[in-house]
Image (spheres, helix red, strand yellow):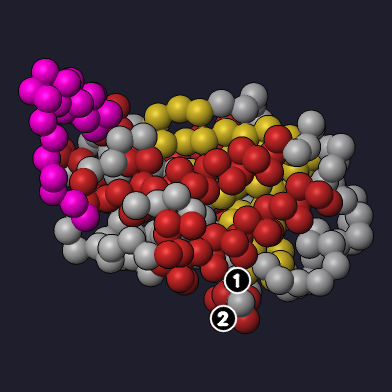
Amino acid sequence: MSAVATERATAVATVVLGPKTRLGAALLATATVNTYAVARDDQDQAALASCGATVIGAEASGPLLGGTQPTALRIHVCALGPVHPETAQPGADAANVDRDLTVVARLLDEAAGRDVHVVLVSSVLALAPAADRTYYAGWKNVVEEELVALVAEHSSARLSVLYPGRLMTAEERRRPWHRMHTTFERLAARMSQAGDGPGRSRLVGLDARAWLLARSFSLLATTFSGSRSTRRRHGVAGATETTERYGIR
């Protein structure tokens, strides 16, 4: 499809933010004529040329979806903030988050007064992070709160947040010890279902529930013992002015 969004009337349009992730690819596998993939730069534009969706630039001028806006909009956020828990790049992460939040804000403004549903895929780590995942989990919470604020500015918009555990391919999940995990395809289907329903938040996957239960027991043990481990983010860059500005420690 053309890299420029065409001016056409559509009933429901779907925008995929993070189309180059495996989750984004699973969503694009079922792309229709009304599906849009957000490209961060020229390299993304080239990589997404044959993705089956209309590719729009994150910093494109003019309306992102063209001159004729859809009557309803679904914004599927597959990646916003750090992708890998072990990697910390505060400056780059902050810039990427600002860029992607600007895209969401522009889409919300363009669709003002229409039915809009933002579906964010977060992580169960955002609810109960391990000691070595606080940077990653902190960004997940920052992103969610920023989206809550953006959506709150539009009375016709709503937000759903999904908190999965580990994601994997269908082939990987065939192994008995991976049956508790969720496939990218299954989560993509959950995102599509969530987009057509009311705004809500929910865990996805048995492993997410098991993790949250285990962390709850850990917190309970801390309550009785009165002590807490001082182990911090092993292998992850420490706090900087950039992360502190967003409330991440």
Dot 1 crowding, Cα within 10 Å, few <14, some 14–19, many 20+: many
Q: Name the quarter where the N terminus is drawn.
A: bottom right
Q: Is residue 241 magenta?
A: no
Badge number at residue 206:
none
Report x, y in % for residue 140: 44, 47
Q: Residue at x 13, y 48 (%)?
A: 231
Spatial distance from mark 2 to mark 1, Cα to Cα? 8 Å
Seen at 40% across and 51% down, the residue is: 248
Q: Amino acid at mark 1?
A: Arg
Asked whether residue 72 appears in the rendered view, the answer is yes
Q: In this rendered view, identify the residue nearer to me: 235 or 30.
A: 235
Q: What predominant SS class does the magenta segment belong to?
A: helix
Q: Which region is colored magenta?
A: 211-233
Q: Is residue 93 above or below residue 68?
A: below
Residue 38 on image: x %, y %: 64, 63
Numbered disc in front, either 2 or 1: 1
Q: Could you say which quadrant of the image residue 205 lies in?
A: top left
Q: Is residue 186 above or below residue 202?
A: below
Identify the residue shown where x is 32% and y is 41%.
125
Return the residue at label 1.
40
The percent coordinates of residue 246 (x first, y second) are 49, 54
User: What mark, if any, has residue 43 been given in the picture?
Assistant: 2
Q: Are marks 2 and 1 in contact (CB under 8 Å)?
A: yes
Q: Amino acid at mark 2?
A: Gln
Q: Secondary structure at mark 1?
A: loop
How many numbered marks have been drawn onto this rendered protein structure?
2
> Between 236 and 52, which is closer to the camera in this rendering?
236
Q: Is residue 226 magenta?
A: yes
Picture layout, residue 173 above or below residue 39 = above
Tell me if residue 185 can be seen: no
Residue at image x 30%, y 56%? 85
